Image (tube, grey):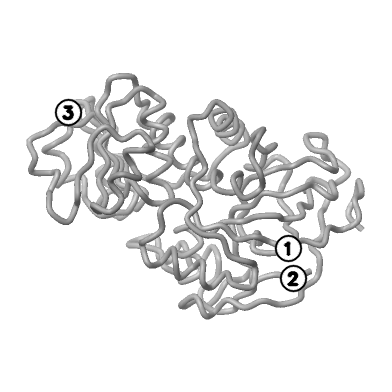
Amino acid sequence: MKAITQTTYGTPDVLSLADVALPAVGDRGILVAVRASAVTQGDRRLRAGDFPGISWLPGRLAIGLTGPRRPIPGTVFAGRVVAVGRAVTRFAVGDDVFGTAMRGAHAEHVVVPADGAVGRMPAGMDYAEAATLPYGALTALDFLRDRAAVAPGQRVLIVGASGGVGHHAVQLAHHLGAEVTAVCSARNHDFVRGLGADHVIDYRTTDFTRSGERYDVIFDTLGATSFLRCRRVLAPKGRYLSLIATAGLLLMALGTALVRRRRAIAGVALGTPQQLDDVRELAEAGAFRPVIDARVPLARVADAHARVESGEAQGVVIVDVATRPARASRVAA
């Protein structure tokens, strides 16, 4: 099969197209013929070996010190099941699915655990639209609904509101009944308003931490702020959320978890089957609208990485994968 490979960390040009062997399914896996993938900020970090703060060493130990141990990148996919392992009952050959993988989604086929963050695609969506959801929508759901318990009428501020996680966070906060303030560049204001933002702030001209406003939840999707800076504009029981877990923030998260006042919350949204099923239901209900910034063929994944790295993307950069499906079977050959 065709796949993107990388043997070292670096700029997008470390990615190249190659012919590789079809992966084996195993008893509890499913083989998916990938029709669409996405390039996320997570993929960018994995490609560059860019793990912030204290996560650098654990991150490199997990995926490879000098280069990735698993050479095929890609963490998001949508496609069709073409083989299932002997112990799999959750999926059948022919099912259209979407989900996340630890690696390997930038290829014509990927193997994922049947009990992992994979589920049936939302009704009415094509593969490219479905591939916009597993990273950003699942992360927004994990942080806003499950960790921060956003409720109707609360004031929620999203930093990086036009990005891969941010534009899903705006939609979800709006769906949950919050009053949403989006922080992004002026050129993206109309875009985030169209997703449900009630107010917009241009980060280039306005420091929201000095505005005097108060927010029940501040969700920094970029790591552009800090808990100490944002604390003064948090409501008495407000929650500060960040996707970038620095040593200082983790200590503050531990400390503030013991009190009933302003809290810091940080971590990684790994995703569960139930969360992905919830994302599907929310998408079918119209809470998540797929937003595609650009589409590139598999051979041009490096261009997709460059687009994401530029910070200019509105929505998700999709990789259209030309598949040559393997012969459908109950057990991998």
- The dot on residue 154 is none
Q: Residue at x 61, y 44 (%)?
A: 130
Q: Is residue 254 visible?
A: no
Specify the label residue 322 is tagged with: 1
Left or right: 259 in relation to 149:
left
Give, as a three-letter code, the residue at label 2.
Lys
Tell me where residue 47 appears, x and y as whole percent. 51, 69
For the residues carrying marks 1 and 2, which lies nearer the camera in this image? 1
Give the crowd class for mark 2: few <14, some 14-19, many >=20 residues within 10 Å.
many
Q: Nearer the viewer, residue 270 or 99?
A: 99
Q: Quadrant of the N terminus?
A: bottom right
| Residue at screen point 88% across, 54% down | 332
| Residue 177: percent from left, percent from top | 35, 22
Q: Nearer the viewer, mark 3 or mark 2?
A: 2
Q: Which residue is mark 3?
A: 235
Q: Which residue is mark 2?
A: 2
Q: CA distance from mark 1 to mark 2?
A: 9 Å
Q: Is there a contact, CB below 8 Å, between mark 1 and mark 2?
A: yes
